């Protein structure tokens, strides 16, 4: 099975690199600068579960169709990512996106109507270091994937077998939509409360009203999910418990993006959750305030960028 992985950063570099370790046929679709670095140094993984330096195959422009494309990018880069993988997607290609939220699924299906789109969830803390290495923090490195239409696909069985040779905690499940909703609810609640308060979970909970507001945000997101047919996975309760962990330094990646003046996945996460609430007639006042806060940040960021360009 020929596998293309879009990007060789924290998520794509880690999971794709582990597949290379297992002997899988993997090609990384990367920008020219990243391709040069990978040719010079190899793909370097630094992880508590085992370091690696791997010789990898790269392309800056796909020139043939692959059996499976693993899509790892930020939601705000999705349009560019879909253009990048266009040459790798043929009528028989399957796409496994590991993006946050759910809005991307319909966008990918619309762009590649003849391809099959799987569901996927990445549970990992990994980033690209300044020296170009993939840095994995902690031991959590789970990937959950499955078909969304109930029709089995042998490619996912092959993928699962490959990951079984690696440290990756890979799970091939029958109810991937439930797992995706679990993460969507968590991300929306975590992003909503930490981005609005501009603080970590622990600092928010240390205030008199912090826990009550965090739970209000979580409850609003859960009501939207249930209106959409969500049935929590067996691990949903433990996953969502991070919102009430005292002294936790946890911040949503959305807040970290705000802190460094970067674009956010605000529309893809908070915007989509709020839009679903509106369609379902679910009142979400806390979520609306959080979404407005992030939207105002984005407007200010773009205005500042235009002002710099004018000078």
Image (cartoon, helix red, strand yellow):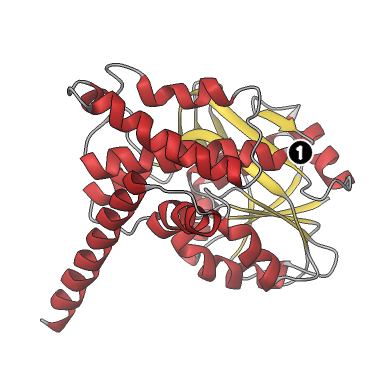
Taking the view exactly as shown, the residue that stands out farthest to the bottom is 310
Where is residue 283 shown, x and y percent of the image?
42, 48
Q: Quadrant of the C terminus?
A: bottom left
Q: Position of residue 175 (x, y in %)?
A: 75, 37
Tell me where residue 291 appears, x and y as whole percent: 33, 54
- Viewer-closest of 296 and 129: 296
Above-or-below relation of 3 to 163: below
Q: Is residue 7 left or right of residue 195?
A: right
**Above or below — where is 109 with respect to 310?**
above
One can see residue 54 in this view = no
Is 305 on the left-hand or right-hand side of 140? left
| Residue at figure coordinates x 36%, y 42% from the top left | 191
Relative side of 262 to 38, left or right: left
Q: Secondary structure at mark 1?
A: loop
Residue 293: x, y in percent?
Answer: 25, 54
Q: Place residue 174 in its image quadrant.
A: top right
Residue at horizontal 60%, vertical 68%?
82
182, 48: nearer the viewer = 182
Q: Neighbour class for label 1 at 10 Å: few (<14), some, many (≥20)?
A: few
Q: Nearer the viewer, residue 127 or 264?
A: 264
Residue 193 is at least partly visible in this image: yes
Residue closer to the observer: 81 or 41: 81
Residue under numbered circle 1: 23
Residue 171, compared with residue 198, is above or below; it is above
Is 123 drawn above or below residue 284 in the view shown? above
Give the mark count: 1
Q: Residue at x 14, y 83 (%)?
A: 310
Q: Residue furthest top?
A: 246
């Amino acid at each position: 099975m020929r596998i293309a992985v879009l990007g060789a950063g924290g998520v794509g570099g880690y999971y794709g690199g582990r597949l290379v370790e297992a002997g899988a046929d993997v090609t990384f679709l990367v920008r020219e600068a990243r391709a040069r670095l990978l040719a010079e140094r190899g793909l370097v993984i630094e992880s508590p579960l085992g370091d690696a330096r791997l010789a990898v195959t790269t392309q800056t422009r796909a020139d043939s169709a692959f059996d499976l494309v693993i899509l790892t990018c930020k939601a705000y880069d999705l349009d560019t990512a879909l253009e990048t993988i266009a040459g790798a997607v043929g009528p028989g290609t399957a796409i496994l996106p590991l993006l946050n939220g759910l809005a991307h699924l319909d966008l990918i299906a619309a762009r590649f109507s003849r391809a099959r789109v799987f569901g996927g969830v990445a549970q990992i803390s990994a980033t690209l270091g300044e020296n170009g290495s993939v840095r994995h923090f902690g031991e959590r490195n789970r990937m959950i994937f499955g078909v969304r239409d109930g029709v089995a696909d042998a490619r996912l069985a092959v993928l699962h077998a490959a990951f079984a040779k690696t440290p990756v905690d890979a799970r091939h499940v029958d109810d991937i939509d439930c797992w995706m909703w679990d993460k969507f609810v968590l991300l929306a609640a975590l992003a909503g409360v930490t981005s609005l308060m501009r603080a970590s979970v622990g600092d928010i909970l240390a205030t008199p009203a912090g826990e009550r507001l965090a739970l209000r945000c979580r409850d609003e997101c859960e009501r939207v999910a249930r209106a959409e047919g969500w049935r929590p996975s067996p691990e949903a309760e433990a996953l969502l418990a991070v919102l009430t962990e005292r002294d936790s330094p946890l911040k949503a990646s959305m807040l970290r993006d705000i802190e460094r003046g970067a674009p956010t996945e605000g529309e893809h996460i908070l915007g989509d959750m709020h839009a679903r609430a509106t369609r379902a007639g679910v009142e979400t006042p806390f979520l609306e305030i959080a979404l407005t806060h992030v939207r105002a940040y984005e407007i200010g960021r773009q205005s500042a960028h235009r002002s710099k360009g004018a000078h």
